[in-house]
């Protein structure tokens, strides 16, 4: 064998080893992604893709063999990245986004657990007082003909309703809530329901920041792959479970295709995407915008984590104060007439 043949053979082995390392890295990322996602159908589809890659199939063959099992957003991102051979980069960002959302949900759940327990205790105490203790006071006041203030009369009427029709009131309330949410979902779409949740102080803003963080990360990756900005705006939005953000991205992309500069197109949407106006101002400068988007994503991620902590620090004292004020009001409302009755009897 000549020296040229030996060099070619060594280079071929190196390229083969690099491809093997790339395939191994991609399969590991796909396995990690399958663990992060909750849908069983998606887990099975990703597992099938991994098996095909391990059996020697190309990326295109492995992914195209699962046309319906993959989430539409992931399938679209893969279709965009396949021609450039950058699937691993997008899978990495998609996995990181899934992990960030999972961490944020976990933080919000942990932050809301104690306040929710306090709320349940508060409701249990209120139900006990209104259904057990107040009827005893009512019988006592009626027996002695005590003149009661208007606020005491109001609480006694509420107590009567709970004692006589408590289950009916609870059923009607839950039914109305279900009807309202269902009507909003049917006539307004999923975006309306999401906007209601995200209009909740602290909690909703944290979810919005998390969506923007993930959006910026994916948008930066797509721009790094030289995907046209309007197409990148739409594709990055599909990977977020935020319908309002997806609608704003669609309007922004349409405005850019009509000839508006990116920063002006974003400002016209009058949505959370306006936060990206300064970042997209230099969208024609390539790498600068990519780095700026990644830095902006980190800022949004930090804001979402701060909001998750604020949920805990605000909800706990607010519920404690509400519990103390309510119980204190009941004590004053019913013990003052009781003291008056004792004075009259003495």
Image (cartoon, helix red, strand yellow):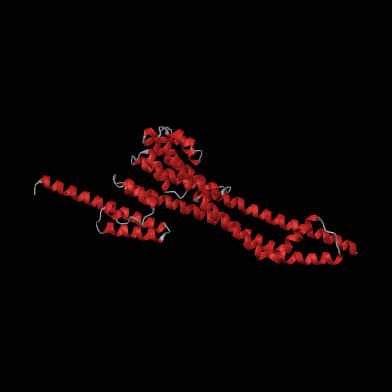
Front in this rendered view, residue 20 or 150: 150
Direction from residue 40 to residue 199 in the image, left or right? right
- Residue lying furthest front: 187
Q: Can residue 212 be seen? A: no
Q: Can residue 331 be seen? A: yes
- Residue lying furthest right: 346
Residue in the picture at 33% in, 42% down: 225
Front in this rendered view, residue 117 or 3: 117
In what quadrant of the picture does the C terminus appear? bottom right
Position in image of residue 275 (x %, y %): 49, 38
Direction from residue 114 to residue 16 in the image, left or right? left
- Residue lying furthest left: 1
Direction from residue 186 to residue 339 in the image, left or right? right
Position in image of residue 173 (x %, y %): 63, 59
Position in image of residue 289 (x %, y %): 40, 36
Front in this rendered view, residue 190 or 194: 190
Position in image of residue 26 (x %, y %): 32, 53
């Amino acid at each position: 064998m000549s020296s040229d043949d030996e060099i070619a053979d060594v280079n071929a082995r190196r390229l083969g080893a690099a491809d093997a390392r790339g395939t191994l890295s991609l399969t590991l990322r796909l396995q990690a992604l399958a663990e992060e996602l909750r849908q069983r159908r998606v887990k099975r589809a990703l597992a099938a893709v991994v098996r095909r890659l391990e059996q020697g199939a190309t990326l295109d063959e492995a992914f195209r063999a699962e046309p319906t099992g993959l989430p539409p957003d992931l399938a679209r991102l893969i279709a965009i990245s396949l021609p450039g051979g950058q699937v691993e980069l997008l899978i990495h960002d998609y996995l990181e986004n899934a992990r960030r959302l999972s961490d944020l949900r976990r933080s919000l759940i942990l932050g809301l657990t104690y306040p929710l327990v306090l709320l349940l205790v508060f409701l249990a105490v209120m139900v006990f007082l209104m259904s057990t203790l107040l009827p005893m006071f009512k019988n006592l006041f009626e027996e002695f003909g005590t003149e009661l203030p208007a606020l005491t009369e109001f609480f006694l009427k509420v107590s009567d309703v709970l004692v006589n029709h408590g289950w009916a009131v609870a059923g009607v309330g839950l039914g109305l809530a279900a009807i309202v949410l269902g009507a909003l979902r049917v006539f307004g779409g999923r975006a309306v329901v999401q906007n209601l949740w995200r209009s909740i102080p602290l909690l909703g803003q944290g979810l919005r920041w998390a969506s923007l963080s993930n959006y910026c990360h994916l948008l930066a990756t797509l721009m790094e792959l030289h995907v046209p900005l309007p197409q990148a705006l739409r594709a990055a939005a599909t990977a977020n479970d935020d319908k309002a953000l997806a609608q704003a991205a669609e309007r922004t992309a349409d405005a850019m295709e009509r000839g508006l500069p990116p920063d002006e197109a974003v400002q016209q949407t009058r949505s959370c995407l306006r936060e990206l106006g300064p970042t997209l101002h230099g969208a024609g400068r390539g790498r600068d915008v990519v780095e700026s988007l990644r830095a902006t994503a980190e800022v949004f991620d930090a804001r979402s984590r701060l909001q998750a902590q604020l949920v805990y620090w605000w909800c706990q004292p607010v519920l404690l104060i509400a519990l103390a004020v309510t119980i204190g009001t009941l004590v004053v409302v019913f013990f003052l007439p009781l003291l008056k009755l004792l004075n009259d009897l003495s």
